[in-house]
Image (cartoon, rainbow, N blue to C red):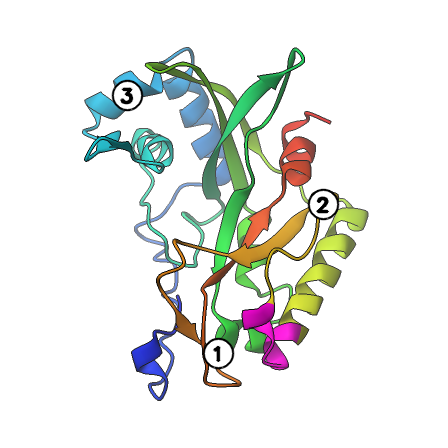
């Protein structure tokens, strides 16, 4: 949840807590359900079945795959900074064929950054870690303009101490930038050699307010790099 420019002096809203009565799906159950429901299915057909808009005003709706997967898995979607369910965070990504091997087409947004919230978090309580530790990645392959099929559905394992150390140190560095009022100057730092990256999010027209300097800055987000996706999907 981001602070709007007009809300500089307003109290920050709390992130809504998960409703345990409404969301009773575990990560294992969602993976099992999706593997059955998506096996050998064309996602374009499923999008039509679930009334998902694939194109809008002649342009491709970039979120159509994720929305379709959420509907098939009966997951309540949205962009709020909270997991999709009790034990899972569902994300989709596209793979491309390069030299006979599947590789991630692009990086994947994990969660947007609210600087005021970031400064108060610990790594273990952070939105980034909550999402990464519950992540399910649905990797898709676009075989043609009208055929898109699921390559894999993977409950991501982030238990490797070396991986955790890398992500924690990077997160702490970003939190330090936020506390110093420099988060607005932080643009695409970190390289594809790392696992997590921070960069601006959106079309560049919208702004949020830095809670330290009071200046308007571009919205930022944590992204999973292609290396993280390769590692998570077993494509290394």
Q: How far is mark 3 from mark 1, CA to CA?
A: 42 Å
Q: Earlier in the sequence, mark 3 or mark 1?
A: 3
Name the main secondary structure of what is drawn in magenta: helix
Q: Nearer the viewer, mark 1 or mark 2?
A: 1
Q: Quadrant of residue 225?
A: top right
Toward the viewer: 89 or 104? 104
| Quadrant location, the N terminus | bottom left
129 and 175: which is toward the camera? 175
**Residue corresponding to mark 2:** 159
Please state the extent of the stretch shown in magenta in the rendering.
177-185
Q: Is residue 222 above or below residue 105?
A: below
Residue 67 circle label:
none
At 73% from the left edge and 27% from the top edge, which residue is drawn? 236
* 17 is higher (above) or lower (below) than 93: below
Q: Of callouts 3 and 2, which one flags the residue occurring earlier in the amino acid sequence?
A: 3
Q: Is residue 180 magenta?
A: yes
**Residue holding disc 1:** 210
91 on left or right of 175: left
Circle 2: element type: loop
Q: Nearer the viewer, mark 3 or mark 2?
A: 3
Measured from the top left, where is residue 173 in percent x and y?
70, 68
Crowding near pointer 1: few (<14 within 10 Å), some, many (20+)? many
Q: CA distance from mark 3 to mark 2?
A: 34 Å
Return the residue nearer the eye: 210 or 150: 210
Compared to residue 223, the image places residue 140 above or below, namely: above
* Residue behind mark 3: 46
């Amino acid at each position: 949840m981001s602070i709007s420019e007009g809300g500089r002096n307003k109290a920050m809203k709390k992130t809504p807590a998960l409703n345990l009565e409404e969301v009773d799906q575990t990560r294992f159950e969602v993976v099992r359900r999706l593997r059955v429901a998506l096996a050998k299915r064309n996602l374009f057909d499923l999008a039509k079945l679930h009334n998902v808009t694939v194109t809008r005003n002649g342009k491709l709706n970039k979120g159509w795959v994720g929305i379709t997967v959420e509907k098939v898995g009966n997951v309540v979607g949205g962009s709020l900074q909270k997991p999709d369910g009790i034990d899972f965070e569902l994300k989709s990504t596209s793979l491309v064929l390069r030299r006979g091997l599947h590789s991630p087409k692009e990086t994947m947004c994990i969660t947007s950054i609210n600087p005021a919230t970031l400064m108060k978090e610990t790594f273990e309580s952070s939105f980034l870690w909550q999402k990464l530790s519950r992540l399910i990645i649905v990797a898709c392959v676009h075989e043609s303009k009208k055929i898109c099929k699921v390559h894999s559905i993977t409950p991501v394992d982030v238990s490797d101490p070396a991986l955790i150390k890398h992500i924690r140190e990077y997160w702490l560095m970003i939190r330090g930038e936020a506390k110093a009022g420099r988060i607005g100057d932080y643009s695409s730092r970190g390289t594809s050699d790392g696992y997590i990256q921070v960069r601006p999010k959106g079309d560049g027209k919208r702004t949020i307010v830095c809670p330290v300097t009071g200046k308007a800055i571009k919205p930022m987000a944590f992204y999973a790099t292609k290396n993280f996706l390769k590692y998570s999907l077993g494509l290394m």
